[in-house]
Amino acid sequence: MLAAFIPETSFTNWHKNIPAVVFAHNTSVHSTLLEIPYFLMFGRDPKLPMDVAMNLPTASSADDMLTRLKRAFENAENNLTNGQVKQKKRFDKNLQEEIYFSTVSPFVRKESQINYNLSVRVHTK
């Protein structure tokens, strides 16, 4: 997404475009959540420059916003769970089970690993 904002001739000022790219990312529909991250974070739709220019009305009441936000959170949670299931199925499809056999127990120490050089210090007055 950042590459679309960078002129091909100069890659030295790419960092100046990061806020615009982040805003564009946060105000577009997320592919897994099927919601706009800005709305989920702030509880309202973003005010875009076109909205200001056209003088579009904002939300009507706090109750409407609250029910809409609750519905958005529920939908996002369901969509996220469904996305996780799809990703797991896609991952498991290419997974090959590997079986390892070991003849050494990790709980048994070899005789050479035991330290018998214990020293006791006695302090006398």
Image (cartoon, rainbow, N blue to C red):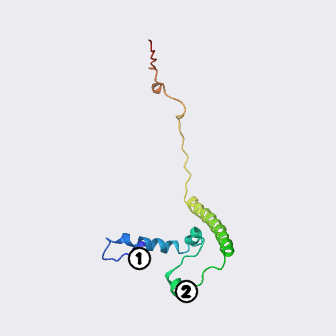
Percent of width and height locating residue 39: 58, 72
**Residue at the spot 44% in from the left edge and 74% down from the top edge:** 20
Report x, y in % for residue 125.
44, 11
The residue lying toward the viewer, choosing from 93 and 89, is: 89
Of the two numbered discs 2 and 1 in the rendering, the one whose residue sits closer to the viewer: 2
Seen in the picture, residue 117 relative to 59 is either above or below; the reply is above
Above or below residue 82? Residue 95 is above
User: Can you say which quadrant of the picture contains the N terminus?
Assistant: bottom left
Horizontal and vertical percent position of residue 92: 58, 58
Helix, strand or loop status at disc 1: helix
**Circle 2/circle 1 CB separation < 8 Å:** no
Residue 72 seen in the current view: yes
Residue 30 in sight in this render: no
Please name the residue shown 68% across and 75% down the image: 64
Q: Residues within 10 Å of mark 2 (few under 14, many from 20)?
A: few
Residue assigned mark 2: 55
Residue for badge 1: 4
- Mark 2 and mark 1: span between their CA atoms? 29 Å
Mark 1 neighbour density, 10 Å: few (under 14) some (14–19) many (20 or more): few
**Residue type of the residue flagged with mark 1:** Ala
Residue drawn at the location 55% of the way across and 86% of the way down: 55
Identify the residue at image location x=48%, y=75%: 24
Query: Of the numbered discs in the image, which one, if any, rests on residue 79?
Result: none
Give the image location of residue 77, x and y in percent: 64, 65
